[in-house]
Amino acid sequence: MNEVPVRHRRTHASGSPPADELKTAAASAGQASESEEDDIIGQPNLEAAGDQLPQSSDKTTEVLDSALKDINPRWRNWIIRGIFTWVMIFGFAFIIYLGPLALVTVVFALQIKCFHEIITIGCIVYRSYNLPWFRVLSWYFLFASNFFFFGESMIEYFGLLLSRTDVLRPFATYHRFISFSLYVAGFVGFVFSLVKKHYLKQFTLLSYGLVQYDYFVCPVRYDEEKDHISMECERSPAFVLTEYNWPETVRTILLLFGFPGTLKMYPFVLHSISMSIFASVIGPFGGFFASGFKRAFKIKDFGDTIPGHGGIMDRFDCQFLMATFVHVYHSSFIRVPDPQKLLQNILTLQAEDQLVLFNLLHDRLVTRGLLPNSTST
């Protein structure tokens, strides 16, 4: 008969284990129980995403369905994709025709729709966690971030005009403080929404949430001199036709064969080469990232907003990476100081500070000989 080893435990005279061992054992048991319960309750339901989320299909309007009902299903999908591709192309061309306000509105609407598709996936997959305020906090942080970024752009171009309106003046003056207050309010709301056993998951989800026409080259802004909004400006050097000289060796060869020794082009064409390289080499990784994200949740598309194409996010997965690059590239290599923006910043100063700045600038210009020395007698 096999002997079962018996582990002797240190006991008190009464035969019971010490109190500290009982506390340790109880804590260990509690942690194990919570861990097991968390494993059972807290597993994300990846299968639910594929079952409950609308996926891309070739279902369209009744008129188009009746017209394509006799076509082979294989070609039917390609025809539908082609039709709605041209619909999107002409639709975007029409939006460009409507002007800057329409473009800003569409960008804002696309951002909201992409965010909605992402949040819908999270709500379905993590429904088993019963996280309170998950959807509300997600939309709140989207609103707070848009209030900050869009507000910064509005103040940059229309700050002087906004400061003249009594209702909007506090928003223009204290915009950053209001933005910070909104963020703090969301932060406090997130802390109140924390649920026992799901702290790590909630903090993870929070980190995801935080994380040739003049109106193409001249931004809409308020003109102080004309006292109205306009798109007239002195074009950036990037949009002015420039003549470039070839290197001496290349120039000699070109002249030998009768070609001109100079090249006329817009400087922005050179910048577009860099952007094109990034879009073709690095940009697709945004699509690869989105594909990996969808595979992780076992879904084919983010939604079915566009027949044959999937959701809005499926069409803009690469654009977020590209938009960030364009912003950084423009700020680093293209953007030049704008006197109109500098004037707007100066006009927000106190009168005494404006006089100090004027005297400093006047002295510098006199020293450089650009202004006559009016103080000399």
Image (tube, rainbow, N blue to C red):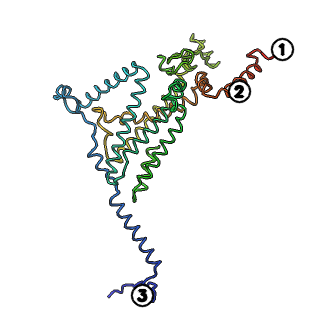
Q: Residue furthest top?
A: 258
Q: Is residue 4 above or below residue 203?
A: below
131 left or right of 223 in image: left
Real-space CA distance between mark 1 and mark 3, rounded to the nearest whole angstrom: 109 Å
Foreground disc of the pair 1, 3: 1
Which disc is residue 15 wearing?
3
107 relative position to 54: left or right:
right
158 to 26, vertically: above or below: above
Question: Label 3 neighbourhood size at 10 Å, few (<14), some (14-19), many (20+)?
Answer: few
Looking at the image, is mark 2 or mark 1 earlier in the sequence? 2
- Splitting the image into 4 quarters, where does residue 28 fall? bottom left
Q: Is residue 28 left or right of residue 271?
A: left
Q: Residue at x 43, y 27 (%)?
A: 104
Tags 1 and 3 touching, CB below 8 Å: no
Distance, label 2 to label 3, CA atoms, is 87 Å
In the image shown, does 354 or 71 lie closer to the viewer? 354
Q: Quadrant of residue 308?
A: top left
Residue 304 screen position, x and y as percent: 29, 36
Query: Callout 1: helix, strand or loop?
Result: loop
Dot 1 or dot 3: first in sequence order is 3
Q: Vertical placement of 181 versus 212: above or below?
A: below
Closer to us: 39 or 355? 355
Marks 2 and 1, how far apart at CA: 23 Å
Amino acid type indicated by mark 3: Gly
Residue appearing at x 35%, y 60% in the figure: 39
Sort mark 1 into few (<14), some (14-19) or many (20+) by Cα contacts within 10 Å. Answer: few
Q: Viewer-nearest of labels 2 and 3?
A: 2
What quarter of the picture does the C terminus occupy? top right
Q: Which residue is identified by label 1? A: 377
**What amino acid type should be assigned to the residue bearing mark 1?**
Thr
Of the image marks 2 and 3, the number of the one nearer the N terminus:
3
Q: What mark, if any, has residue 356 been given in the picture?
A: 2
